[in-house]
Image (cartoon, rainbow, N blue to C red):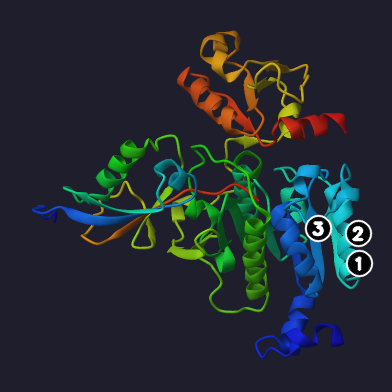
Amino acid sequence: MKKELTDNIFVNIKYFGVIAEKTNLEIEKTSFDFNQLSKIVESIKNKYDLHQLSFQISLNLNLVNSEDSIIVNDGDEIAFLPPFAGG
Amino acid sequence: MDRYIKQLKLNKIGLKGQAKIEKSKVLVVGVGGLGSAVLPYLVSSGIGTVGIVDGDNVELSNLPRQVIFNEDDIGFSKVDRAFNKLKKINNQTKIIKYNSFINDDNVKEIFKNFDIIVDATDSINMRYLINDACVQLKLPFVYGAVYKFQGQVSSFNYNSGPTYRCLFPNQEGIVENCEDAGVLGSTVGLIGMFQLNEVIKIILNFENVLSGKLLIYNTLLSTQHFFNFKKSEQKKVKGIIESNYISFNKADKIKNTLFLDVREKKEIPKIYLKNGVNIPLNELSIKNKLLKKSKNIVIFCQSGKRSKIALNLLKENEFLNLKLMTENAIEISRIINK
């Protein structure tokens, strides 16, 4: 059951590797007036132009499929995890 | 046993643990920054058999991070030079060297002689190849990779646990290696040590192996982060390695293969192949009409980035028989000139 969102939610977002370079941030706290993970990820992708990059998403330290219908709660943490190549 | 007295003193190791270390066979794929960090310690700890595989020669620009080599080694085979050094460190360890890059033809033949595979490569393609071979041979695979001042570590396929494909299922998108992105010796050194630590934990059946866990270490902030991931059943590898990639040797044996070099005309090394054509990426959207759709087109460039973009561009233009070459231009030129 989807709850109607009455207030904005605040989400901590962590960026790693090449993504952190694109965003120029390691971490930020952002508010959203929607709470679907897929929409949040999409809005971050648009905000920082991440469409060309490959990454996985974690919610509260657990990897998730960001296309699944997952609800994000106030205070949750999302991380953008790209694969690294170097060695 | 005097030699190992300090590690024997650790209750968690003891004589039993040392015997396990001496029985184990560990293969290090790639003698670059990570390999240079892992190898001396692996051999020093008394591992029974250590394999090294790499087809490259030592270059001057390797020295700041590939500390197993010195100035006299420049121009010589990495595995030959590493072999000599490692033998001097511990003559009791059997060292097996493979002077080639791994590819889908040789990977299982090499891996089957070992119990643990250490990934010390610098490309994503190689990691999928290592992963798929390890899944098929039921071998644990200790992953380490670096991006500038950050590193990732995990132990895949440990006791049939989650694999690299469970963590990173897609091959799309752009990923830079050390040559492109730049790297500092201390970062690869640290990540190599984390990998070595995983190897020892696996050999000694310690708890808390990084299975289903990705460690990301940031050397600038001195922070570490752990992320959990599960085994995803859909990503199980069936039969042969499923990928967009093909090795040069394999592709060359296929009759209607056309090698497509998407680098600029002036880039070196120049690759002359009788079944090859050079169309720079920025001309490909117009000049793709010159290519026959019936051909088995195998694309390559300098680092693997442009060839991926070219693959997608050709797909949009309804080309069907497309592959990316496992090797980049430098590796191909070495294969041709051997």
Amino acid carrying label 3: it is Ile
Tag 2 near tag 3, CB within 8 Å: no
Q: Nearer the viewer, mark 2 or mark 3?
A: 3
Q: Secondary structure at mark 3?
A: loop
Q: Are marks 2 and 3 on the same chain?
A: yes
Chain letter for mark 3: B
**How far separated are the C-alphas under marks 1 and 3?**
12 Å
Q: Residue drawn 76% across and 68% down?
A: B42
- Residue at label 2? B84
Q: Secondary structure at mark 2?
A: helix
* Nearest the eye: B115 or B148: B148
Residue B187 position by quadrant: bottom right
Residue B138 visible to the viewer: no
- Residue at label 1? B88
- Residue at label 3? B68
Asked if B311 appears above or below A24 in the picture, the reply is above
